[in-house]
Amino acid sequence: MVATRYFTPYEAEKTLPLVRKIVKDILDTTKEMRLFADDLGGEIDGNEQIKKMAGKVERFFNELEEIGCLYKDWNFTIGLVDFPSVIDSREVYLCWRSDEDRIKYYHGIEEGYANRKIIPEGYLNN
């Protein structure tokens, strides 16, 4: 098992150019998969093209994992990514959506996107 990497907001933001590209690839590929599946009338079992696209998405997930962050948008609509962090001596996730230019929010490990809070000012320049 790989040890968890904890990011400061600054460190997480430094990864955003690459993370943004990978998330775009995930969203583009899953959109293509949905369109292709619709063309097939939903009959996708055993379809080689769908399997190939799913393999690409899996590789994109692995790339994010190598960086140390987690993909959390299982509807594949907003490109949600969490970065493990510590704020006020608590393990949390820094939370970023693909339509946001910066990482401004966090939430508890057991909480989700709906419980996002603004990152305290003292953590933003570290």
Image (spheres, rainbow, N blue to C red):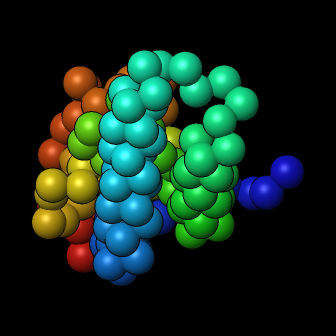
Residue at the image point whose x is 43% and y is 20% from the top: 41
Closer to the camera in the image, 107 or 125: 107
Q: Quadrant of the C terminus?
A: bottom left
Q: Using the image, determine if residue 44 lies above or below residue 117.
A: above
Tell me the quarter of the picture where residue 121 sits: bottom left
Is residue 107 visible in the rendered structure shown here?
A: no
- 91 relative to 102 in the view: left or right: right
Describe residue 45's horizontal placement relative to residue 88 as left or right. right
Residue 91 in view in this figure: yes
Residue closest to the eye, 27 or 101: 27
Give the vertical position of 64 relative to 97 (above or below). Answer: below
Residue found at the very far top of the displayed protein: 42
Kindly identify the residue that appears in the image at 59 percent across and 47 percent down: 49
Residue located 18% across and 65% down the image:
102
Residue 16 quadrant: bottom left
Above or below, comparing residue 83 to residue 76 in the picture: below
Q: Residue furthest front?
A: 40
Q: Provide residue 56's location: percent of width, then percent of height.
A: 59, 57
**Spot occupied by residue 86 in the image (x, y as percentages of width and height):** 46, 51
Q: Position of residue 34 (x, y in %)?
A: 38, 34
Picture quadrant of residue 125: bottom left
Residue depicted at 40% across the width and 76% down the height: 18
